[in-house]
Image: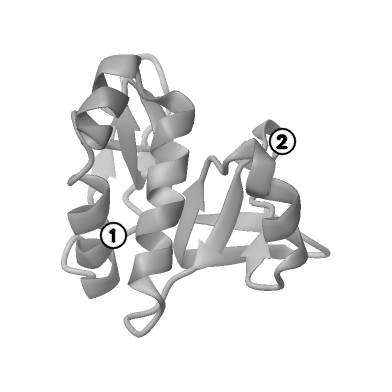
């Protein structure tokens, strides 16, 4: 088992397979955004432009913990959040859901154009103006 440790914190086990083809498709889209980077946090890949705008994999709380290893967790556009919550494909993830984040399970045959649009909207919520200008340029 690979452990990713942070100074002063308990190490988190790596909770993803770097060779996951769904993660590869997500990375391709997330890292195409200006100045976007990837960092492993809490054992999962996160995508950032300064602040985090997306994460691969997570869970949600119910009567039991429900794990979504192939989910995109993201910061939705506030104007679209209520509509997204009404769509049964979306869920409120544990931890980051308290900050308005949503999740959607991904599959190789999902609508990757929609995923790119969700990433674009999430990126615009946190990215600095210069990165958004590059995106719109």
* Residue visible at 67% across and 37% down in the picture: 100
Coordinates of residue 61 in the picture (x, y in percent): 73, 55
Coordinates of residue 38 in the picture (x, y in percent): 23, 38
In this rendering, the answer to whether 70 lies above or below 53 is below
Residue of label 2: 98
Nearer mark to the viewer, of 2 and 1: 1
Coordinates of residue 66 in the picture (x, y in percent): 65, 66
Quadrant including the N terminus: bottom left
* First of labels 2, 1 by sequence position: 1
Q: Residue furthest bottom?
A: 109
Residue of label 1: 26
In this rendering, the answer to whether 43 lies above or below 130 is below
Quadrant including the C terminus: top left
Crowd class of label 1 (few under 14; some 14 to 19; many from 20; radius 10 Å): many
Q: Marks 2 and 1, Cα distance to the nearest angstrom?
A: 24 Å
Decide if residue 61 is on the left or right side of residue 14. right
* Residue visible at 36% across and 47% down in the picture: 44
Q: Say which quarter of the image contains residue 37.
A: top left
* Residue visible at 61% across and 50% down in the picture: 102
Decide if residue 26 is on the left or right side of residue 66. left
Coordinates of residue 109 in the picture (x, y in percent): 35, 85
Pick the residue in front: 8 or 79. 79
Mark 1 residue element:
helix
* Residue visible at 34% across and 70% down in the picture: 112
Q: Residue furthest front?
A: 137
């Amino acid at each position: 088992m690979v452990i990713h440790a942070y100074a002063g914190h308990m190490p988190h086990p790596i909770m993803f397979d770097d060779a996951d083809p769904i993660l590869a498709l997500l990375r391709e889209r997330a890292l195409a955004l200006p100045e976007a980077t990837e960092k492993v946090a809490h054992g999962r890949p996160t995508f950032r432009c300064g602040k985090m705008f997306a994460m691969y994999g997570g869970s949600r709380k119910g009567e039991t913990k429900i794990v979504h290893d192939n989910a995109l967790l993201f910061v939705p556009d506030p104007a679209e959040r209520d509509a997204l919550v009404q769509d049964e494909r979306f869920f409120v993830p544990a931890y980051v859901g308290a900050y308005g984040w949503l999740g959607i399970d991904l599959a190789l045959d999902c609508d990757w154009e929609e995923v790119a649009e969700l990433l674009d909207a999430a990126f615009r919520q946190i990215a600095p103006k210069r990165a958004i200008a590059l995106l719109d340029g």
